[in-house]
Image (cartoon, grey):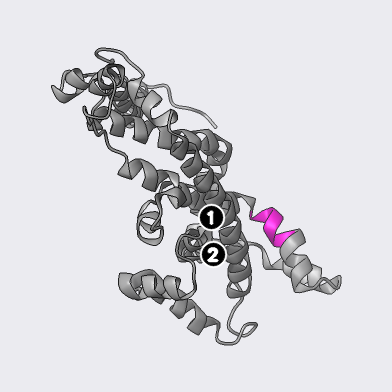
Amino acid sequence: MIRETTLGSKAFDVLLILFLVGTALLCVLPLWYTLAVSLSDNAAASAGQVSFYPKGFNFGSYIEIMGDSKFFNSFWISIQRVVLGSGLNFIVIILLAYPLSKNARNLPFRNLLMWILVFTMLFNGGLVPWYQTVKSLGLINNIWALVLGSGVPVFSVILVINYFRNLPKELEEAALVDGAGPWYMLVKIYIPLAVPVLATVTLFSIVYHWNEFFNGLVLMSNADHYPLQTYIQQLVVIVDANTMTAEQIQHMSELSNQTLNAAKIFIAMIPVLIIYPFLQRFFIHGITLGSVKE
């Protein structure tokens, strides 16, 4: 391929680079600002004096959060939720997507099942019936209440269905000729070829289970069972001069809900920022190939 080197093409390349750099800055600067606020003292944050570097540099907000044993308990609960929830989502997505990727001749009532799935994306039973159902199953204050409620991520199922349908039919025909059964084809052919889209939907599941806080707030009546996002969403700075020593009052005076909330946000982002680089190379490939059916 011959690349044009005219003045117009060079100008376009420069504009494109500037646009991409600007887009990257728009993504990074809010995170940097959040970090700066979390490392600033109460007065500077409340007065709006923090720009892109901390004012009155201190780790008070992080010390307040990390020094709390309940923080580590909620962190552990969130890890359990991510592992159990993502694992359940992975199994359910594959076992739903594989048969639904077949046509109606191979799977009777396939179209009806697809309409039922799509219907659940558009409508739900409501908050109160959902809560009563969970309560009737005895799952209040149980980790499985946070996991089973999102066990069927329909959007991810549809992505994997379309990815499976885009795979060459000749592979399945050759496997059938060689005597392979459905389970063998799923495990040995479909899953290895679908690594990009499966990595993508797994990333969706991880991010959802890590970031979601509302279910923990509603389904957990005891703060000891809160996942991390619910715990830090409830965390506020309360100063009671009657029960604190002078040293504790001095420490708490350096904090505010603004700096503490910034620290919460930054801490909550770290696990996803660590995981994402390992899965991002599959992300675009999985989305584009799983989004449409040829």
**Residue for badge 1:** 289
**Do the CB atoms of the residues marked 1 and 2 lie less than 8 Å apart?**
yes
Q: Residue at x 54, y 56 (%)?
A: 85
Q: Position of residue 117 (x, y in %)?
A: 46, 74
**Does residue 191 belong to the magenta stretch?**
yes
Which amino acid does the dot numbered 1 rest on? Leu
* Count of marks overlaid on the render: 2
Give the quarter of the image for residue 129: bottom left
Q: Residues within 10 Å of mark 2 (few under 14, many from 20)?
A: many
Front residue of 265 and 64: 64
Q: Residue at x 38, y 74 (%)?
A: 132
In the rendered view, does 181 fall on the left or right side of 114? right
Checking the image for residue 162, the label placed there is 2
Please determine whether, in this image, residue 282 is positioned above or below residue 246: below
In this picture, which residue range is highlighted in magenta? 189-194
Does residue 52 show up? Answer: no
Q: Residue at x 45, y 49 (%)?
A: 224
Q: Position of residue 274 (x, y in %)?
A: 52, 33
Please determine whether, in this image, residue 148 is positioned above or below residue 244: below
Location of the N terminus (image quadrant): top right
